[in-house]
Amino acid sequence: MSELHELLCRNFSWADKIKSRSPDFFKNLSERHRPKYLWIGCSDSRTAPDRLLDLPSEQIFVHRNIANMVHSDDASCMSVIQYAVDQLKVDHIVVCGHSHCGGVRAVLEEQTSGPIDQWLKPLSVLKTSIAGKLKQASLNERSVTLAELNVVKQVTNVCKSATVQTAWEMGEKLSVHGWIFDVSTGILKDLLGDITSARSAAAVKEQYF
Ligand SMILES: [Zn+2]
């Protein structure tokens, strides 16, 4: 028997439990996909958004990768943003980083190689740009500082995407947010407030970079 048989059993009893409580649940789920939020987060298994937000997963459209990066030449991420904004009409895009991030720590300790090294190149550049600020701090403090600044940087990348720029030009209600999750306390922190226009996005860029 497959080692993963237990997972299939768990799925069966999960579906069964829901259907016994709400017989039309999956029928309704199959007929509607209208999440209000796009979440761009880290792949870290401790940071699943539906768990942190205590929301049903169908309310959050999700894109996750190592260190919650938004590269303008990443067709996967750009497609997710396009689909979320143009088709699903989400109201909010949240970029969320977190403490104790393996990607951030790897960059700080210069332990990246292979595809990860390539993927995290912009994070290395960011680290170099704040080298003075990071010098005296402990590894934990440095990783929080870099993770927070990385969130701000990725928020600016979301804001300058063609999809978001066009949505704002068309007067659509769309706001972008930068948050950080503290794995050691379970608490999310809002770093930037609501960014609701190209002008407010430019102000963030001006303030940080
Ligand atoms: Zn991470």
Image (tube, rainbow, N blue to C red):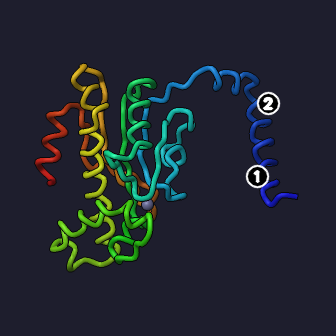
Residue 191 vs 100, above or below: the answer is: above
**What whole-number distance in Å separates the C-alpha atoms at marks 2 and 1?**
20 Å
Where in the figure is residue 108, as x and y percent of width and height? Answer: 32, 73
Say which residue appears at 38% left-offset and 28% top-offset: 85
Task: Give the quadrant of ligand 1.
Answer: bottom left
Q: Quadrant of residue 177?
A: top left
Local packing at callout 2 (Cα closer than 10 Å; few below 14, some 14-19, many 20+) is few
Residue 92, image x, y percentages: 36, 33
Residue type beneath disc 2: Ser
Vertical side of 201 occupied by 45: above or below: below
Please name the residue shown 33% across and 49% down the image. 71
Which residue does the numbered mark 2 point to in the structure image?
Answer: 20
Q: Amino acid at mark 1?
A: Leu
Query: Helix or strand or loop: what does disc 2 sit on?
Result: helix
Relative side of 37 to 25, left or right? left
Within the image, what quadrant is residue 80 found in?
top left
Name the residue: 31% across, 53% down.
Answer: 151
Placement of the N terminus among the 4 image quadrants: bottom right
Numbered circles on residues, count: 2
* Rendered position, 175 above or below 7: above
x, y (%) of residue 87?
A: 44, 23
For label 1, being within 8 Å of ligand 1 is answered no
Give the image location of residue 161, x and y in percent. Answer: 28, 37
The C terminus: image quadrant:
bottom left
The residue nearer to you, when weighing 95 against 74, is 74
Per the image, label 1 sits on a secondary structure element best described as helix
Answer left or right for 185 relative to 24: left
Q: Which mark is residue 151?
A: none
Q: Determine whether, in the image, residue 36 is placed left or right of residue 146.
A: right
Residue at coordinates 37% horizontally, 28% vertically from top-left?
91
Identify residue for label 1.
7
